[in-house]
Amino acid sequence: MKVRAIARYIRVSPRKIRLLMREIKGKKVEEALNLLAFAPQRGAPILRKLINSALANASQYPDIDVDNLFIRHIFADEGPTLKRFRPRAMGRAARIRKRTSHLTVILDER
């Protein structure tokens, strides 16, 4: 049985958080949490929190064995971009894009 958790409007670029997701996809939940505990990237604590949320969702079902769960799918979709401007030379302005992500993790039993 599949269990999922979603985090929306997270202030991390989807491109940067996908690098972490690629590392933990297909791994057991315990192993993925250990990898994220020592990852230096800014998105690592966010992903740990998301996986723990999916574990909590799985514990609500009595027929799921939480120890046998692994990460079936994990992906980041692009959320809305906050647009800001920075002054540049000769009266011009440069656009700064502050990107957001919608994160989804789906756990399944092996």
Image (spheres, grey):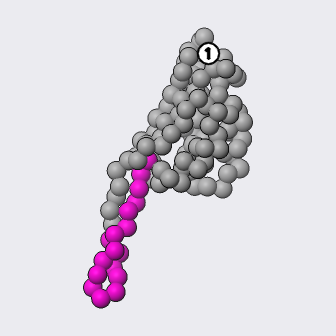
Identify the residue at horizontal 70%, vertical 23% (top origin): 67
Residue 99 vs residue 93: left or right? right
Residue 86 vs residue 12: left or right? left
- Of residues 9 and 13, the one drawn nearer to the viewer in this rendering: 13
Q: Where, quadrant-wise, is the C terminus in this rendering?
A: top right
**Label 1 CA crowd tier, 10 Å (few <14, some 14–19, many 20+):** some
Q: Where, quadrant-wise, is the N terminus in this rendering?
A: top right
- The location of residue 22, given as percent across then percent down, is 60, 44
- The location of residue 28, given as percent across then percent down, is 69, 31
Identify the residue at horizontal 48%, vertical 50% (top origin): 14
Q: Residue furthest top?
A: 63
- Of residues 30 and 60, the one drawn nearer to the viewer in this rendering: 30
Identify the residue at horizontal 41%, vertical 51% (top origin): 100
Quadrant housing residue 61 = top right
- Of residues 81 and 66, the one drawn nearer to the viewer in this rendering: 81
**Which range of residues does the magenta coloring cover?**
85-101
Residue 98 vs residue 52: left or right? left
Tally of numbered tags: 1
SS type, badge 1:
loop
| Residue type indicated by callout 1 | Ile
Q: Residue furthest left?
A: 91
- The location of residue 55, given as percent across then percent down, is 59, 28
Image position of 76 with respect to 67: above or below: below
- The location of residue 103, given as percent across then percent down, is 48, 41
Identify the residue at horizontal 54%, vertical 36% (top origin): 74
Q: Which residue in the protein does label 1 denote?
A: 64
Image position of 15 with respect to 3: above or below: below
Please say whether residue 53 is visible from this viewpoint.
no
Image position of 83 with respect to 26: above or below: below
Q: Is residue 91 magenta?
A: yes
Please say whether residue 82 is visible from this viewpoint.
yes
Q: Is residue 28 magenta?
A: no
